[in-house]
Amino acid sequence: MKLRDQERLALTETEYGGLLLDRKSGDFWHLSPSAAKGTRALLAGGGVEEAARDIRDSCDTTEQQAAEDVRTVLEILRAVGVVEG
């Protein structure tokens, strides 16, 4: 999995999670705290496993929930059209 055209996305982390904005369409998504951490890892070039590990290590969540959050983020990124492969 590789991300392309990442500059069209903006992630702002808040005390309640995060907000992911598609600068091209104006669409935005509210993210849980763990999903925001996973998104940050993916946008920084990390892979799925790295993003899930980052969530698990930094949030009070299970490995199963971390993986689910990464899958949710990937669905959003695929819908936006920035995921290759």
Image (spheres, rainbow, N blue to C red):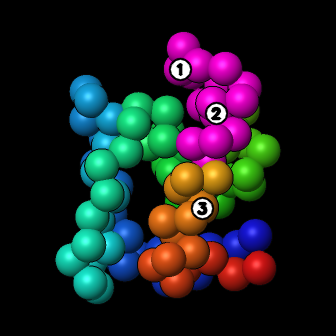
Q: Nearer the viewer, mark 1 or mark 3?
A: 3
Q: Which quadrant of the rendered structure holds the N terminus?
A: bottom right
Distance between the alpha carbons at the discs numbered 3 and 2: 12 Å
When asked about the image quadrant of residue 4, the answer is: bottom right
Which range of residues does the magenta coloring cover? 55-70
- Residue marked by disc 2: 66
Neighbourhood count class around disc 3 (C-alpha, 10 Å): few under 14, some 14–19, many 20 upward: some
Magenta stretch holds residue 27: no
Q: Position of residue 77 (x, y in %)?
A: 52, 69
Dot 1 or dot 3, earlier in sequence: 1
Task: Point out which mark residue 13 bears.
Answer: none
Q: Nearer the viewer, mark 2 or mark 1?
A: 2
Q: Secondary structure at mark 2?
A: helix
- Residue marked by disc 3: 74
Q: Is residue 41 visible?
A: no
Dot 3 or dot 2, earlier in sequence: 2
Q: Position of residue 29 (x, y in %)?
A: 31, 57
Residue furthest to the top in view is 60
Neighbourhood count class around disc 2 (C-alpha, 10 Å): few under 14, some 14–19, many 20 upward: many
Asked whether disc 2 touches disc 1, contact meaning CB atoms under 8 Å apart, the reply is yes
Q: Position of residue 81 (x, y in %)?
A: 52, 83
Q: Secondary structure at mark 1?
A: loop
Q: Secondary structure at mark 3?
A: helix
Q: Amino acid at mark 1?
A: Cys
Which residue is depicted at the point 27% across and 64% down?
A: 28
When asked about the image quadrant of residue 84, the answer is: bottom right
- Residue marked by disc 1: 59
Q: Amino acid at mark 2?
A: Ala
Q: Which quadrant of the rendered structure holds the C terminus?
A: bottom right
Q: Is residue 70 above or below residue 27?
A: above
